[in-house]
Image: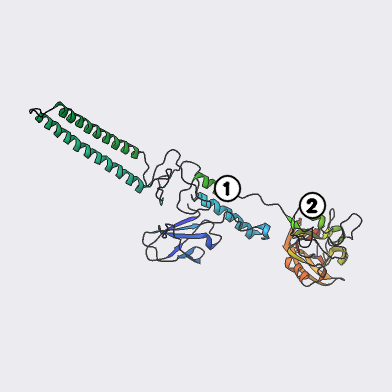
Amino acid sequence: MAYSRVVATGNGSTNQFAVNFALDYLLESDVTCRVGTEVDGGGNPIYRTLTFLSTNLVQVGGSIPGNGVQIVFERTVDKDTLRVDYNNGDQFDEDNLMIAQKQAMMAVHEVLDGRFSVLTQDLDAGGFGVVNVRAPVAANDVATKVYVDTVTDVAIDAGETAVVQAAIATTAAAAAQADASEASDTLALTVAAQAGAVTAQTGAQTAQSAAEDARDTTLAALSTKADKASPVLTGVPTAPTAAPGTDTVQLATTEFVQDAVASAGAGPAPANTFKANNTGATAPPTDITPAEAAAMLPVFSSGTKGLVPAPTAGDITDGDYLNAAGIWVPKKIIRTQSWLTIIRHSATSANGTSSGAWAFPGSALSASAVQFNGSTITGCRLYSARWVVAWNPNATTASPNGVALAKADSGPTNVVHLTSFTRASTTTPVVDAVDVTAALQLLLDTATTKFICHQVVGNGTTGPMIYSSEVELIWEFTGT
């Protein structure tokens, strides 16, 4: 079956055709259409415009294809550009994973369909013909039937002409010999005339024999040539290597196919990179190592609920990190990752309430909260914020237990849930995660300081247990 090529046949009355590729297509612009052997004035293939009436139904632009005319639809994906690039900020989710997998599979489909340009072994057409080959130019070009027929006709014509001329010479020599015999009866007959006649006849016979040998040699040489239609090639046929990315009817060499296959393979994932400006406000950021980035931007500490202590002797200087007052004045770091730890227990669980109402585990707000200083963090943009909670719902019945991420003021007052998870009939540990970028970015945009905390709810029988509750932050800092 064809994966990336669909061939339809025109009936002279419609320009709408069903196009069913394996895995469909990523972009409509990946699909091309060629009607018959249409070319422009320069001999280049003409591709018709397409209008997609639905996912698998297209309308071909221009005149309606004639009856019996082949319409070839081909799907070609990028092989030097990723459709999904996580290093450029694309979301790591199910949809993007599917797009990336399809792009790789579609490139393989093109190879499976024979849409390659470099052979890795002798070409075996399997009983099918090689079509749309241009006329040969160089000595190692594939010969077309038109070229072979022309060479054959010229050679045969030359051989036949030589045979006719030799026959004429033979006749003339015979006549000369007869005249010489008649002249021998007269005094004008000389030995020289007889010798000349014999020499002429011998030369004519030699010419005729040479012409016949030339004709036989030509016919023998032509018998080893491949036909234009469905040629059967032997040995190691060669052809010019097309430029990378060529998509025409030009024959492909093994070099072209290997380059194309190599470029379609997935390379190793690039390592994380960091950029910083340590030399002055006008100098461009340069690459730094992860260790250098960590030294310049320390992450949150779970022991202090997200607030880094004031620097002490030997520490980095104030202004290089999020200080104890919640003010971050970073150097020119472009992007970094950190964790806002709400609560983490290495050995014991945090038992949630089983009262049936949302409440703070432990004692009030302080047991499960960090302060997010949206009013003092400047020059900051969140690329991603994700709440990750490891917990045991401990729900022994069909009534669910739950855990929620909330924002609140001191007291606590004004408690508002940002998001929550609930599970029923589950008594084993689970890990849940959800994106909260918009909610935390709003605190930055409105310069609002809130406590980020979590609450739990039990079903009246048992309460949940929380092992770790953290918010993963990926920042971009543009401040000075």
Foreground pick, 91 / 353: 91
- Give how far across and how far down residue 259 sits, in percent: 55, 47
Q: Is residue 233 visible?
A: yes
- Give how far across and how far down residue 404 sits, in percent: 78, 65
Name the residue tied to disc 2.
291
Residue at x-position 32% and y-position 36%: 217
> Secondary structure under badge 2?
helix
- Give how far across and how far down residue 372 sits, in percent: 82, 66
Is 75 drawn above or below residue 455 in the view shown?
A: above
Residue 80 appears left or right of 242? right
Q: Residues within 10 Å of mark 2 (few under 14, many from 20)?
A: few
Foreground pick, 373 / 153: 153
Q: Residues within 10 Å of mark 1 (few under 14, many from 20)?
A: few
> Secondary structure under badge 1?
helix
Q: Earlier in the sequence, mark 2 or mark 1?
A: 1
Q: Is residue 92 visible?
A: no
* Residue most extreme to the front: 187
Residue 422 appears left or right of 367? left
Q: Amino acid at mark 1?
A: Ala
Name the residue tied to disc 1.
262
Is 418 drawn above or below residue 44 in the view shown?
A: below
Residue 356: which numbered mark, if any?
Answer: none
Foreground pick, 417 / 162: 162
